[in-house]
Image: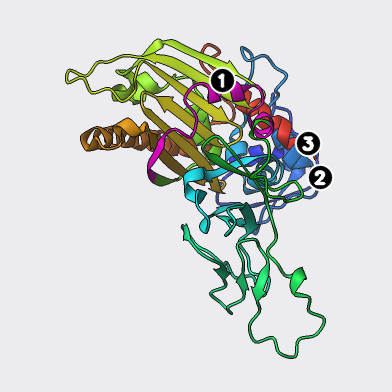
Amino acid sequence: MAIAQSIAYLPSSKTLTLYRTPCLSPSNPLLSLRHSLRISGVSATFSGARPLRCTVDAFDPTIPLEEALTPPGSWYTQPSFLSLELERVFFRGWQAVGYIEQIRNPHDFFTGRLGNVEYVVCRDTDGDLHCFHNVCQHHASLLAFGSGQKTCLECPYHGWTYGLDGKLLKATRITGIKKFNINEFGLKPIEVATWGPFVLIRLDNDAISCDGRDEERVGDEWLGTASHLLSTNGIDTSLTHVCRRDYTINCNWKVFCDNYLDGGYHVPYAHGGLASGLDLSSYETLTYEKVSVQRCGGTTSAEDGFDRLGSKALYAFVYPNFMINRYGPWMDTNLVIPLCSRKCQVIFDYFLDPAHVEDESFVLRSLEESERVQVEDIELCEGVQRGLESPAYHCGRYAPSVEKAMHHFHCLLHSSLTIP
């Protein structure tokens, strides 16, 4: 067990200063603890990076699923662990941030935030797709908020104005300034691309616009060999966006992901209404490089013939934080954004076969049923977070027959966190 996890066993009214010391043994977590901790009553600090690496390695991905322990509670509670995740997980590789209907036309834009990165995705007058850090190069004000249409990005603070291609068009009241090159003060670009109905960005490459990039190559980079399965199972641009709902949940972002990835384990216990529409005996899980797919058959059980789930349901998890749910005429996506170590935002976007968009009663009833499931999941996730913070919990176990996708997720996390 890592030192940081051992803190949970000490009285919460005390705070700790940590010194260099070997990782504590999982079999005897408090062995020689008195030699490695000093009660200061002021703060908790790490001397060096070793304790955090010990926390990462408290999960061993080489142990077979049938014998493996889940990651320790400290993975879900330490602020320093989230900082490492942002650096090595979220700021590397493609990240889903939106859908193409948001930027279908010239001058369309939308904004977002991931960790400390504020970004704006937009289409310029020529229809070219761009993404930039949403930060004015004058005095760091945010430039745009929400979504909509703009012909330019004007800073609300001092009026510096940028084109939707990122070039600085106007710098106000700079008479007398010296050694100023307007070409050096454009917006900082971020790499952006699309795949199917989704907009993606990546923060670890030299930024270029990828609107014309081969979508197949982007899919291979983002989805690996799962790309074909998803694109041939109704995850495409044929559906119409219906609405967006977002939730702020008092749990670590991984708690929500774990809940999604338990192979339907919790469904009959927590989601009676959902369970009645699924054939859980047909549930199966497939894993790919950075994607896991859970799928099962559906059942039409409503006496009035209402059926939002259809004859089959597919639930795809795209590492690290994006979920695509395709069932009946519906598709919904869940984007999980970490806000802090104990809080996340989950953004739901709902898409529907155009043939059903005008059926108001069907749409409203479907959204009501989905909302009921989300409320049930929020209660579960917030309860799990409180349990993870308890001194009574360290690690759990996997149910091998159903929690394969969850274990796959944890192994991917460990791999990302151990690559400098």
Report the disc number at residue 20. Answer: 2
Q: Earlier in the sequence, mark 1 or mark 2?
A: 2
- Mark 2 or mark 3: which comes first in sequence? 2
x and y, in percent, of residue 263 in the image? 48, 19
Name the residue located 63 percent from the left edge and 53 percent from the top edge: 130
Residue located beneath label 1 in the image? 229
| Position in image of residue 288 (x %, y %) | 64, 21
Q: Is residue 167 left or right of residue 121?
A: right
Can residue 76 be seen from the camera position used here? yes
- Disc 2 versus disc 3: distance between alpha carbons? 22 Å
Question: Viewed as shown, does residue 188 lie left or right of 379?
Answer: right
Q: Nearer the viewer, residue 87 or 118?
A: 118
How would you rate the neighbour count of disc 1 (Cα within 10 Å): few for under 14, some for 14-19, many for 20 or more? Answer: few
Against 75, residue 130 (above or below) is: below
State which mark lies toward you, 1 or 2: 1
**Which residue type carries mark 1?**
Leu
CA separation in Å, label 3 and label 1 = 29 Å
* Pointer 2 local density, CA inside 10 Å: few below 14, some 14–19, many at least 20: few
What is the span of residues highlighted in magenta in the rendered image? 217-244
**Amino acid carrying mark 2 in the image:** Arg
Q: Nearer the viewer, residue 233 or 411?
A: 233
Element marked by disc 3: loop
Q: Which residue has dot 3 on it?
A: 419
For marks 3 and 1, give the one nearer the viewer. 1
Q: In this rendering, is residue 211 above or below 2?
A: below
Give how far across and how far down residue 62 sits, in percent. 73, 19
